[in-house]
Image (cartoon, rainbow, N blue to C red):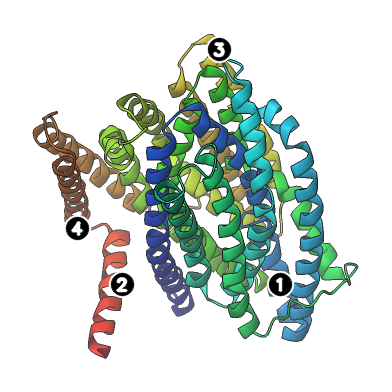
């Protein structure tokens, strides 16, 4: 293997690891936020209303922010900077920042006005709870301006990623979660009667947190020589090129979130608590995606864009293959872990306050089936980034639309025909995610003119074998350690951590015994980084 290939692989692994460590802290804060929300709102209609109210601006965030905006911005910015230099690329950033800001102001105003209509379309409450509908509309109006701040923050994230600063943006959600946590605790214990219910506290905290995320990144971007002074040259060729990439990708970049929107609509029709249960299950599911899979996809895009611009096809394919194997190394054992230990994990994280044992059953039921698609969701994001690096936004759109139809049809069958309750929502999502991955994988093989993208398939098989052994080990440990219902909550949490640690150790040992090169090289790289830091000290 050439030295340049090794450098790219090492760069992706190291940058992903660094970003993952920061993201892990962020996700821990996110879980703490979810714990507080679960304790205060449970899986009641108030929790459902908050989930619906936040889902509308959050969906648009995925459309305009980190998914589509960054994916269309980075390849064009990279090409412009290579061809015309840094000064022109900085003008390009100002023009895009100005244009995006104006568009977002209009969308936010429209969203605030039509929120009640959007909520009625989305929230098909099984018992026609008008109080829930009105509350969801109020909360959505409060949180819609969050879209403005978080989308512009995502554009700044794109600039920082191009410059190699991944951890700065990865740390910004910590601020959002900290604002929500502190606000919830303050109003719960010091001003409990200030709002009619606690969902309003969470809504206003989301808005303030979005502003904090936006403000936090500005000094770092400014330090890189970028200005935020408005620039209205929207007819500049590279701005138009980005718009042409951005427009068709709006749907394709956010298929995961759109399918979640469809699932939520069907969940609301089943009964009270299903919407919030799907939301909580998705949060746990996305913990793994956010900690590592998204980090790999984020780090990979600038590298892949550079390789494709320089016509280094072989290195681009190798980079893509390595990224997929790296994701498999984390997501496959995580999926098995959620299948075996999902109920105990949900109980450990959420079950107190308004979150009852019934809530645990609903969330864990959704999580168990949802976890099957973990590898496919994570890998789909990487495949989409590959098309974006080639400036092809249309192919993911066609694939996403097909997956959207499958998800909606599957939800209808599972909910109304087979009466699977909340499990049907997860099953439908799994089917749609697997189908969309397979289609995009086949199309990418043809586009890159290769017989297979994932090379070294034996390493994937070793990862799968180690994951199966880990699942069996965890199941046995669970049977002996977690079967006593009389355990105190603290002792139960301690034993769950012991079981998880046992699973991680067994997974690592089997990978070492099987000589899984991906696992061994990743661990050696991590050890080397720690050793270098220790020597410096």
Asked if one can make out residue 288 in the rendered structure from this viewpoint, the answer is no
In-image side of 65 versus 351 (left or right): right
Comparing marks 2 and 4, which lies closer to the viewer?
Answer: 2
Q: Position of residue 523 (x, y in %)?
A: 27, 66
Towards the viewer: 444 or 483: 483
In terms of sequence position, does the residue under pointer 1 or pointer 4 come before the other?
1
Disc 1 target residue: 77
Task: Determine the CA span between mark 1 and mark 3.
Answer: 48 Å
Cβ atoms at labels 1 and 4 below 8 Å apart: no
Residue 210 screen position, x and y as percent? 59, 59
Q: Between marks 1 and 4, how big is the CA–CA gap?
A: 42 Å
Residue 525, numbered circle: 2
Are the residues flagged by discs 3 and 4 in contact, CB closer than 8 Å?
no
**Label 3 – label 2 distance at C-alpha:** 51 Å
Helix, strand or loop at label 3? It is helix
> Label 3: which residue?
416
Question: Disc 4 designates what residue?
Answer: 512
| Front residue (pair 182, 220) | 182
Residue 186 in picture, x, y percent from top left = 43, 53
């Amino acid at each position: 293997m050439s030295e340049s290939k090794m450098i790219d692989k090492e760069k992706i692994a190291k940058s992903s690891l660094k970003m993952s460590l920061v993201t892990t802290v962020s996700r821990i804060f996110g879980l703490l936020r979810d714990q507080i929300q679960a304790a205060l709102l449970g899986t009641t209609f108030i929790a459902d209303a908050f989930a619906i109210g936040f889902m509308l601006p959050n969906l648009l965030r995925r459309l305009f922010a980190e998914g589509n905006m960054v994916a269309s911005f980075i390849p064009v910015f990279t090409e412009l900077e290579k061809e015309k230099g840094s000064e022109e690329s900085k003008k390009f950033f100002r023009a895009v920042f100005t244009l995006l800001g104006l568009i977002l102001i209009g969308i936010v105003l429209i969203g605030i006005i039509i929120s009640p209509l959007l909520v009625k379309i989305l929230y098909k409450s099984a018992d026609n709870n008008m109080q829930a509908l009105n509350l969801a509309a109020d909360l959505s109006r409060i949180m819609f301006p969050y879209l403005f701040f978080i989308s512009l923050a995502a554009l700044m994230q794109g600039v920082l990623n191009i410059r190699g600063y991944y951890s700065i943006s990865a740390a910004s959600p910590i601020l959002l979660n900290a604002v929500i946590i502190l606000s919830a605790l303050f109003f719960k214990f010091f001003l409990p009667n200030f709002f009619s219910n606690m969902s309003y506290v969470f809504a206003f905290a989301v808005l303030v947190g979005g502003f904090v995320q936006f403000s936090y990144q500005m000094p770092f971007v400014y330090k890189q020589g970028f200005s935020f002074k408005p620039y209205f040259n929207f007819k500049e060729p590279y701005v138009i090129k980005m718009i042409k990439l951005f427009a068709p990708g709006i749907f394709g970049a956010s298929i995961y979130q759109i399918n979640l929107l469809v699932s939520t609509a069907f969940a609301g029709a089943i009964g009270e608590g299903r919407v919030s249960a799907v939301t909580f299950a998705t949060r746990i599911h996305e913990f793994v995606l956010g900690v590592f899979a998204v980090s790999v996809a984020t780090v990979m895009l600038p590298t892949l864009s550079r390789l494709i611009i320089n016509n280094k096809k072989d290195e681009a394919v190798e980079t893509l293959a390595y990224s997929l194997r790296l994701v498999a190394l984390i997501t496959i054992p995580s999926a098995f872990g959620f299948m075996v230990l999902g109920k105990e994990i949900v109980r450990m994280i959420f079950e107190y306050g308004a979150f009852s044992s019934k809530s645990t059953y609903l969330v864990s039921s959704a999580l168990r089936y949802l976890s099957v698609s973990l590898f496919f969701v994570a890998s789909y994001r990487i495949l989409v980034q590959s098309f974006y690096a080639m400036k092809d936004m249309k192919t993911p759109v066609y694939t996403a639309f097909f997956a959207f139809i499958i998800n909606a049809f599957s939800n209808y069958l599972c909910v109304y025909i087979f009466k699977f309750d909340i499990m049907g929502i997860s099953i439908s999502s799994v089917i749609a995610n697997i189908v969309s991955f397979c289609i995009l994988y086949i199309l990418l093989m043809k586009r890159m003119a290769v017989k297979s993208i994932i090379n070294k398939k034996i390493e994937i098989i070793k990862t799968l074998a180690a994951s199966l052994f880990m699942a069996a080990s965890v199941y046995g440990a669970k049977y002996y350690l977690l079967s006593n219902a009389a355990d105190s909550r603290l002792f139960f949490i301690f034993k769950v951590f012991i079981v998880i640690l046992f699973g991680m150790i067994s997974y690592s040992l089997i990978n070492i015994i099987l000589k899984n090169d991906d696992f061994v090289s990743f661990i050696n790289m991590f050890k080397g980084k720690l050793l270098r830091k220790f020597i410096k000290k």
